[in-house]
Image: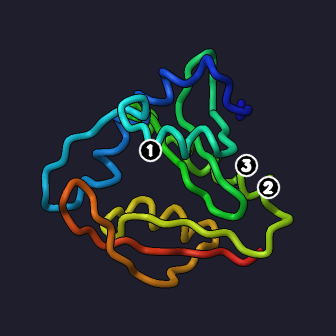
Amino acid sequence: MIRLYQKKDLATLSEIYRKARPYELGFELNSFKFYSLLEEPENLKRFLQSTIYVLEEKGVLKGFGGYVNDYIAWLYVDPPFHRQKVGIRLLQHMLEKLKTQKQLRISIVKSNQAALACYEKLGFRERETFSINFQGQTLEGLRMTREL
């Protein structure tokens, strides 16, 4: 079931974020250190200001997604549940919640081909590239949009 985030979910979602981040940046040539949301105050603040949905089955939190206005800011799946359509289900749920928006936006690391394919499958299109500074390294990002 997909439901709204509850405070009791924070520790688990924080760890899902930490475990999923290497997959987000796994095709970069640099090695990075990954932290939980609870260890990243800036990201935690953004997380808490977002509308967050959690996919839970049989008491197990498998992933989460969230947005601020028309910007999908969060989509992380616990690695043991990759390739089980958890991300697609969360995205479809958010698309339904955001159907009154004219356009949706998302940003990804360009080397994350799995995310790119997932978003393209749901109608997002590449708009522009941009630079991301992450732990002192410059990465190439990709902005995508979907017209509704």
Residue at the farthest right position: 100
Horizontal arrangement in the rendering, residue 97 relative to residue 44 (left or right): right
The vertical placement of 102 against 109, above or below, is below
Q: Residue at x 64, y 45 (%)?
A: 50
Q: Amino acid at mark 2?
A: Glu
> Judging from the image, what secondary structure is the residue with disc 3 in?
helix
Q: Earlier in the sequence, mark 1 or mark 2?
A: 1
Q: Position of residue 80 (x, y in %)?
A: 39, 31
Q: Which mark is residue 96?
A: 2
The vertical placement of 16 against 9, above or below, is below
Q: Earlier in the sequence, mark 3 or mark 1?
A: 1
Between 65 and 92, the one nearer to me in the picture = 65
Disc 1 and disc 2 in contact, CB within 8 angstroms = no
Q: Amino acid at mark 3?
A: His
> Judging from the image, what secondary structure is the residue with disc 2 in?
helix
Between 12 and 59, the one nearer to me in the picture = 12
Where is residue 132, by image quadrant?
A: bottom left
Between 118 and 72, the one nearer to me in the picture = 72
Residue identified by numbered label 3: 93
Where is residue 148, by image quadrant?
A: bottom right
Q: CA distance from mark 3 to mark 1?
A: 26 Å
**Which of pointers 3 and 1 indicates the residue nearer the eye?**
1
Disc 2: CA contacts within 10 A as few (<14), some (14-19) or many (>=20): few
Disc 3: CA contacts within 10 A as few (<14), some (14-19) or many (>=20): some
Q: Residue at x 32, y 74 (%)?
A: 131
Q: CA distance from mark 1 to mark 2?
A: 28 Å
Q: Residue at x 42, y 37 (%)?
A: 41
Q: Which mark is residue 42?
A: 1
* Color theme of the render: rainbow
